[in-house]
Image (cartoon, grey):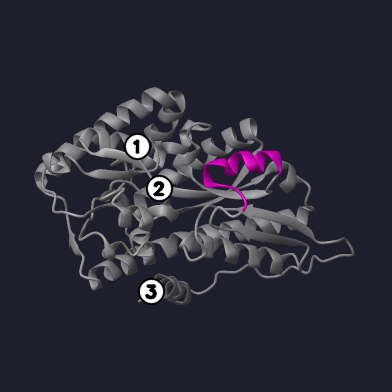
Amino acid sequence: MQRREMLGTVMGALGAVGVMGAGMGDARAATQWKLATGYKPETLHTQNIEQFARDVEKATAGDLKIAVHPNNSLVKLPEILGAVQSGKAEAGEMLMSAMVKDVPLAGADSVPFIVSSYKDAHRLWQYQSPLLEKHLIDEKGVVPLYAVPWPPQGLFTVKLVRTKADFQGLKMRTYNATTVRIAELLGAQSVDVAAPDIPKALASGQIDSMITSSLTGVESQIWTHTKYYYELNAWIPKNLVFVQKKALDALSPATRKAVLEAAKAAEERGWALSEAALRASVNELRSHGMAIDRISPDLSKDINRFGEKFSREWVRTVGNDATRLFVPFYTQAP
């Protein structure tokens, strides 16, 4: 099954959760928004954004149309927040951990081994969301619309790894400060590679290991270059879709309400899509002959120690916000 077909199957199985039209069209010209994302059209996130855009257009009877610009075609992923602030794009999507230089709290979901299930990840987001919203509105002039997780992060390698020593000499793909630190602690060489460039980096030997989701592995057809996938469940990162506050405030109350309702539906749909994509992508990796396994107990002990180190470092970096997030997360656990 090809990756586009797999995502199409997942979307079809879940059905489209749309927002019903409210008959809000009037004589004014339609408002046009540009939404920039760094991900390919076939990823679950982009597919979900496209549905969000259709829902908004339908709910507003064409009063607001959102043109989605995927795959870094309008703005490169690291620059999307700035582009939305400046008005180059009215809305955008970023991996939250890519926003940590601007908003440190955005990195909570990428601290290793804080969560290992969708249930935990959703509960963490409930505490993180209002804190993050305040920072983004007050400091950046953008409003979060919704967040959707990637499947849990696993480990891909070209060779069998059982201990920390097995990573010596490996070139590990990194994409944020956390993955750079993991590579350093494991003794691997850190190589910065964006998601769209993974196949080329693997084919050229630029990288031979990486921590990423099983879905990204499928989208990169990683089985042509690697043999092993370890279900590490290191963290469950999220992509955030956001809009310039000025652009949102300029809408009529009815249109603004339709956007927020469509965003709520997109978040619910996106989480369900992510869980379905996890199941489908692991099965897809297995069908192409990849070995699917858990990491060894020895390696697990080392990595868990890394998690404790990362947690302490992150709390020291973020300060009071980390306390306001983690205290209720841990003390009010069900």
Instruction: Report whether residue 183 is seen.
Output: yes
Residue type beneath disc 2:
Pro
Residue type beneath disc 3:
Gln
Q: Circle 1: is it few (<14), some (14-19), or many (20+) Cα within 10 Å?
A: some
Residue type beneath disc 1:
Thr
Tag 1 residue: 178
In magenta stretch: residue 75: yes
Q: Which quadrant of the figure has residue 59?
A: bottom right
Q: Circle 3: is it few (<14), some (14-19), or many (20+) Cα within 10 Å?
A: few
Which mark lies nearer to you, 1 or 2?
1
On screen, residue 183 versus residue 273, left or right, reads left
| Numbered label attached to residue 237 | 2
Query: What is the CA distance from the residue labelled 3 to the residue labelled 2?
Result: 24 Å
On screen, residue 121 versus residue 25, left or right, reads left
Tag 3 residue: 2
Which mark lies nearer to you, 1 or 3?
3
Q: Secondary structure at mark 3?
A: loop
